[in-house]
Amino acid sequence: IYDITEKYIPKDYLAEWQGIADGANCSIQMVRRIALFPQLSKAACTIFVANNEATSGGGVNHLRALDFAPLSYVADFASVVIYHYKSKPQLANFAWIPMTGVLTGMNDVPMSVGEKEWGGHNPLL
């Protein structure tokens, strides 16, 4: 999948993957395989959002469940990575090592992100 997606992968992701491979003393190919795993799955993780009068303070509450089985291999490598950028909002990424980008995260704007696959659902929703 790397060969197909390489031209779309941000350069800072490639640099981060190389740093992870160097720090873990493993091949860059192994890091790429793990990092690109979500691109091959049809995961449809659970998301719940409540806002306005549905919350006690009238704000927004965002809940995201990364619906991988607790006993699956990926569950052993959960991570929280905090990115401290100089020219962009600070970012917390909740994922697995070495999955860069954001499956679920939040920043200091404040804004939260939760990727959702709607496969099989009514496209009008």
Image (cartoon, helix red, strand yellow):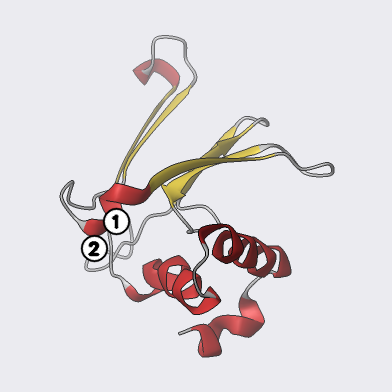
Disc 2: which residue: 121
* Residue at the (69%, 37%) spot, across then down: 90
Q: Is residue 73 left or right of residue 79?
A: left
Give the residue at x 38% y 70%. Answer: 37
Label 2 to label 1: alpha-carbon separation: 26 Å
Label placed on residue 74:
1
* Residue drawn at (24%, 50%) of the image: 67
Figure quadrant of residue 21: bottom right
Q: Secondary structure at mark 2?
A: loop
Graded by Cα atoms within 10 Å as few (under 14), some (14 to 19) or many (20 or more), the crowding at tag 1 reads some
- Visible in this render: residue 99? yes
Q: Position of residue 94 (x, y in %)?
A: 45, 43
Nearer the observer: mark 2 or 1; the answer is 1
Q: Which is nearer the N-term, disc 2 or disc 1?
A: 1
Q: Is residue 2 left or right of residue 122?
A: right
In the shown orientation, is residue 74 left or right of residue 70? right
15 to 95, vertically: above or below: below
Under mark 1, the amino acid is Val
- Amino acid bearing label 2: His
Horizontal and vertical percent position of residue 43 = 28, 62
Horizontally, residue 69 falls left or right of residue 83, namely left
Residues 52 and 115: in front is: 115
